[in-house]
Amino acid sequence: RFFEQLHHNYRDRVLFVAAYDKEDERHPVGMSFCLYKGDRLYGRYWGSLQEIDCLHFDACYYTPIEWAIDRGIQSFDPGAGGRHKKRRGFPATPNYSLHRFYNNRLAQILKSYIGQINEREQEEIDAVNEDLPFTKLPPLLLGD
């Protein structure tokens, strides 16, 4: 029902990237799911039925980037997690989420440690971004 509702309400904001085996083009072996709005693309939920070399990167980065360039998308946020993103030119950035805990004890534990967790995550983000493979150059002025 989730995907049916998604299609009904958000089909103009969804990008699916599906990978197929040459032997069976009816059933995907892996897919990624991105959302877009205006000039921004957000990724990615991802899954696969088998381990295929580079499938993750093609479905989650390279194909969505190509799609975004073709459509004039100005910004692509590939989602949370992974030091492997920096080699592809993506700086680590904090993400925000909302959670509801139905177990009071768990809620109390997490509430008491969330500040420390966020500090450690920011330290990890800073460490990843210290040695990005690309540098941001100052804007080029016409006439220089």
Image (spheres, rainbow, N blue to C red):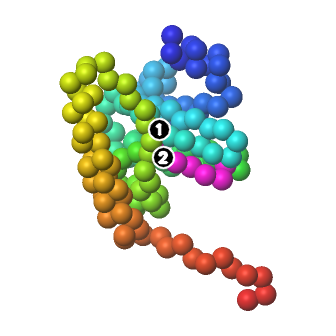
Residues shaded magenta? 73-79
- Cα distance, mark 2 to mark 1? 6 Å
At x 21%, y 33%, the residue is 109
Q: Quadrant of residue 45?
A: top left
Judge from the rendering whether residue 105 lies leftward or rightward of residue 128; answer left or right: left
Under circle 2, the secondary element is loop
Residue at 54% from the left image edge and 36% from the top image edge: 34
Where's residue 139, x and y in %?
66, 76
The residue located at (61%, 52%) in the rendering is 75
Three-letter residue code for mark 1: Arg
Q: Which residue, given by chain and number where applicable, does mark 1 sit on?
A: 44
Q: Residues within 10 Å of mark 2 (few under 14, many from 20)?
A: some
Q: Position of residue 30 (x, y in %)?
A: 42, 31
Q: Name the residue carrying label 2.
A: 78
Work out whether residue 75 or residue 33 is closer to the camera in this orientation and state it. Answer: 75
* Residue 75 seen: yes
Going by the numbered disc 2, the residue's amino acid type is: Pro
In this rendered view, identify the residue nearer to me: 52 or 61: 61
The image position of residue 117, as x and y in percent, is 27, 47
- Within 10 Å of disc 1 (Cα), the crowding (few <14, some 14-19, many 20+) is many
Residue 119 coordinates in the image, percent (x, y): 30, 54
- Check residue 77 for magenta coloring: yes
Given contact means CB atoms under 8 Å apart, are the residues at marks 2 and 1 in contact?
A: yes
Would you place residue 18 above or below residue 87 in this image? Answer: above
Question: Most extreme residue toward the right, as rendered?
Answer: 143
Q: Which residue is the extreme one toward the top?
A: 1
